[in-house]
Image: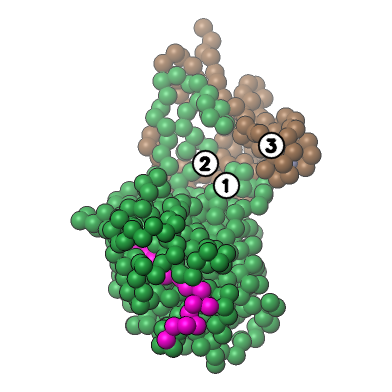
Chain colours: A brown, B green
Amino acid sequence: MTVKQVPLVDYLHIGARPYLKAKACTSCGARFFDRRIACGNCGAQEFQNVRVRNQGVVTAFTIVHRAAPGIPAPYVSAIIETDDGTSVRSNVVNCEPDPERVKLGMKVKLTTYSIGTDDEGTEAIAFGYEPA
Amino acid sequence: MAKSDQGKKKPKSSGPMIDDDSVWVLGTHMTKFGRYSDHDAVDLASTSAIAALQDGGVTIHDMDVFAAGTLFQASSGMAQQVQKQIGQTGIPAYNVSNACATGATALRTVMLSIKAGEADMGLAVGVEQMGKMGLLGGAGSKKEAKVFAPSGRYGAVTGTDGYIGTAGMPGVFAQAGMGYAYENDGVDFEQFAKVAYKNHLHSTLNPLAQYQKEFSLDEIMGAPVMSYPNTLLMCCPTGDGAAAAVLVSGERLKSMPKKVQKRAVKISASVLTSDPWTSSAQVQPDVNTLTRNAAAQAYEQAGVGPDDLDLVELHDCFATAELIHYDNLGLCEPGGAGDFIDSGAPFRDGRTPVNVSGGLISKGHPIGATGIANIYEVATHLRGEAGDRQVKGAKVGLAHVIGLGSACGVHILEKAA
Ligand SMILES: [Zn+2]
């Protein structure tokens, strides 16, 4: 029996080739990950779905030692700027949570991992970025 | 009004004239920040309100407008509750909530009423009772879902804090600081830590500070890490407290005794901004752009530049935040915030003393009170009444607060003639 999988958030496309989906304002190009009524930059109301590039660089990070309940710590939280200029907040995974290992400007790429299974056997898939 | 020449100090022999349409701080007060188990927020706000009225030599019966700011008790009708303690005179009362800029927004609400000609005098109070709720990091994840079903604006199937980066305040502001380090080579952990060293040192001279203890740089850097590079000693505590200010129109102030006029402090600029759209702010609050916009507007309004400032109280909720605001407020060369702290400029005896009160890091940060407490601090120095921590000869000061979401308040105050 195959396990049913769902993405942690609806802007993550899971499968063999995972990627993030953004809504791009057709008027000004501003990109969003949340449900939209209108564009926060220009006010236009039309969007098209775009596929965000999987490669990027770390432009800011922190190593969180005091995490929310149930979250393993320490972990690396970062702001990634993808190669197409989209800002993404994400954990950096497959990298030691140590300021000597995580570097500003570090090249990273998107990956996915399981964060657990619910009572009905559905597995939730999260995204992270790992050193490229 | 023209912007002053950068790098050239204005002649400071005399203070501003009293224009009819100007607005002044007539009286001000803050409680000691800390933990009050036997007082609630209404007690604290009422105590501070009465003390500010007394400081200004007026009573609640002289007030034409009242605004009360609190974040955590935003729906409690704080203004009316305080009125029921200090005097129900029937004047318009506003309940204000605007993240960490709540106090500044309450003050501005009173100021705008005076500017609009509806009031000659008004009272603003800011208060918070937080107790021990942890380091503003309380953005906990939702309880693990039994069933992974999408909900909310991102269609999340469970809590995302910790899976999609951090939503905790120490981490958000750590990332803001590290973003500055990414853009400006050489900014490092030690420079961020020095900010906390300075503010803890300053706090030893402020009897109203929640903590008054000096720590060595080693102790600060070696303290438990909350969110690197912010250690425990680089984060503001939670706490309780209140602050209040009585504002008066210039026209009314003119009719008051010279002695009263001498202690009045002019509000030369009052600015509130929210954030314009930026790409990065879609995933992480941008605390820079709206602060830069607020500073530019405030300098323009007041006709002063950063070099004219004798002291600055800025929003150091975390050490990383203070460092980047040196740059955002134009206190240093662009990109030069690290050099600025290394040079000693923001220390009490430096070129531009910053957070001589001890800042949020040691003075404390009862959220609703903060945006008036920093007005209290600057005004007290301009009046020459700051005791051991007095910045000598202070004539012009700036108070800055920022609340995530975001809201930024900047006020520039000037000493009376
Ligand atoms: Zn747009």
What residue is drawn where x is 68% and y is 77%? Answer: B1
Q: Mark 3 sits on what residue?
A: A38
Q: Secondary structure at mark 3?
A: loop
Q: Are marks 2 and 1 in contact (CB under 8 Å)?
A: yes
The kind of residue on which mark 1 rests is Gln
Q: Which of the two discs, 2 and 1, sits closer to the camera? A: 1
Q: Quadrant of residue B305?
A: bottom right
Q: Is residue B245 magenta?
A: yes
Q: Please determine if labels 2 and 1 lie on a single subunit.
A: yes
Is the residue at mark 2 in contact range of ligand 1, meaning its CB lies under 8 Å from it? no
Callouts 1 and 3 in the same chain: no
Q: Do the CB atoms of the residues marked 1 and 3 lie less than 8 Å apart?
A: no
| Amino acid on which disc 3 is placed | Ala
Inter-mark Cα distance, 1 to 3 = 19 Å
Depth check, front residue: B214 or B92:
B92
- Which residue is farthest top? A1
The segment highlighted magenta reads B240-257
Q: Residue at x 36, y 46 (%)?
A: B76
What element does badge 2 sit on?
A: loop
Which residue position is annotated with label 2? B165
Question: In terms of image quadrants, where is residue B14?
Answer: bottom right
